[in-house]
Amino acid sequence: MEKNKECMVLITSCYAYRDVLKNFEYFFHKYWPDCPFPVVLNIDKPLKDYALDYDQVVVSPHKENLVRMREVSFRTPYVLLMQDDHFLFDRVDNDAVLRCVQYAKKYHCGNLRLIQDPKTTDVFSEAEQLMEYKPGKAYRISARGGVWETVYLKRFIDVFKDLWEMERHGQNLSNRIDRKVLCTKYRVLPMIDAVHKGYYEDFACMILEANGISAGRKQMSNAQKAKEYLKGAILDWNPELITGIQDKWNIGYKHSYSK
């Protein structure tokens, strides 16, 4: 099958998450076997084998994922960015994804997320079921599965070191770039957060078990979930204020890398 030349799928992973990547690959193969785009893996160390037939594996030894991406040869005008700890859980509709690539092109989007996260009430196109993240919206920039204009994505890759830093501090940069940030009203890319701070989420464990796969790492405890729910509730209270304080004083969760 000739691959679509307008977009590529870029999967970011690391050796420390090789067990998670293996499960990601299982669900990608199960639910998106006819992916129309070239699929590229960006990882810090080579693995002995892969469950997916990648078009390219780019190995870069840097610990930070955006620094690793600087060594990727971007040959398409758009990129669908995916992380290894976000699992597909249902069949991907190629027609719907291809439409989103065309919407991104039509509206000169820097990023068009295929999942509405965080929630937004700003309707961009009711007919096309598109929502908008306007400048100033908390977490306007997110690494959640979405279609990026390659030139736009590279602006963030060049400035930030990892996806966590990009999500936390990328909003101000995005406000200065004349590109729209949109999302689909309904979930086009059927995926879930599978791992949080090294622990499997409940639903991820359920779908792994349903497919006869051992998780291989611990599930989040009730105490950990209570802490995350409390933080989420605080963020929901006034997300723009909270993220503004976090950004100004550089407080809150900071990503750490396993060796």
Image: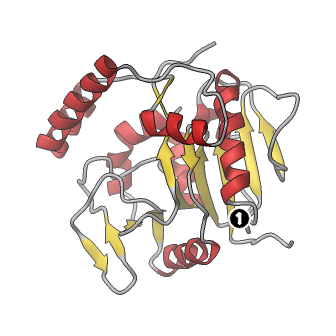
Which residue does the numbered mark 1 point to in the structure image? 76
Furthest toward the left, the residue is 237
Side of 66 relative to 239 (left or right) = right
Q: Position of residue 128 (x, y in %)?
A: 40, 83
Task: Answer few, some or many: residues within 10 Å of disc 1's Cα (few below 14, many 20 plus, some between 14 and 19).
Answer: some
Q: Amino acid at mark 1?
A: Thr
Can residue 216 be seen? yes
Can residue 251 be seen? no
Tell me if residue 55 comes above or below residue 197 in the rendering: below
| Quadrant position of residue 131 | bottom left
Looking at the image, what colour scheme do you see?
secondary structure
The quadrant of the picture occupied by the N terminus is bottom right
Report the front residue among 21 and 203. Answer: 203
| Quadrant position of residue 228 | top left
Q: Residue at x 57, y 45 (%)?
A: 87
Q: Residue at x 18, y 45 (%)?
A: 240
Side of 10 relative to 256 (left or right) = right
Tell me if residue 220 comes above or below residue 96 in the rendering: above
The quadrant of the picture occupied by the C terminus is top right
Q: Residue at x 71, y 24 (%)?
A: 15
Q: Residue at x 81, y 42 (%)?
A: 51
Q: Position of residue 187 (x, y in %)?
A: 43, 63
Report the front residue among 50 and 101. Answer: 50
Tell me if residue 20 comes above or below residue 54 in the rendering: above
Furthest toward the bottom, the residue is 127
Side of 222 relative to 189 (left or right) = left
Report the front residue among 207 and 83. Answer: 207
**Secondary structure beneath disc 1?**
loop
Q: Position of residue 139 (x, y in %)?
A: 32, 47
Report the front residue among 109 and 55. Answer: 55
| Quadrant position of residue 257 | top right
